[in-house]
Image (cartoon, rainbow, N blue to C red):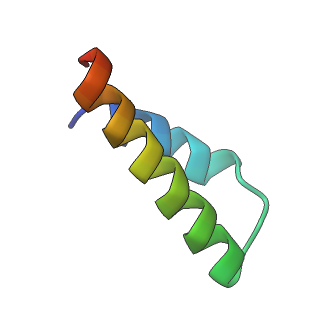
Amino acid sequence: MTAVDDYLDELRRLLQVRGAMRRRLLKECRDHLVDSAAVDGP
């Protein structure tokens, strides 16, 4: 498991938004974190 996965798991546990908005938020976060890790390293 990567640091991005760990962070997203914690976010999933704490996030109080449900449904499509939750999926969209988590996808956006994942995309940005993966992009950032690619540029800055893990």
Percent coordinates x, y for residue 15 in the rendering? 71, 53
Residue 38: percent from left, percent from top: 24, 30
Extreme residue in the right direction? 16
Between residues 19 and 25, which one lies in front from this camera angle?
A: 25
The residue lying toward the viewer, choosing from 33 and 20, is: 33
Q: Quadrant of the C terminus?
A: top left
- In the image, residue 19 above or below residue 29: below
Q: Is residue 39 above or below residue 35?
A: above
* Left or right placement of residue 2 versus residue 3 in this view: left
Farthest residue, direction front = 39
Quadrant of the image for the N terminus? top left
Quarter of the figure with residue 33: top left
Residue drawn 58% across the image and 70% down it? 24
- Above or below, 23 against 38 in this view is below
Rendered location of residue 5, percent (x, y): 34, 41
Residue in front for this viewpoint, 12 or 37: 37
Q: How many marks?
A: 0
Q: Position of residue 29 (x, y in %)?
A: 52, 49
**Which residue is rendered at x = 70% and y = 75% of the image?**
21
Tell me which corner region of the image, top left, top right, bottom left or bottom right, holds residue 3.
top left
User: Which residue shows up at 67% across the image and 82% down it?
Assistant: 19
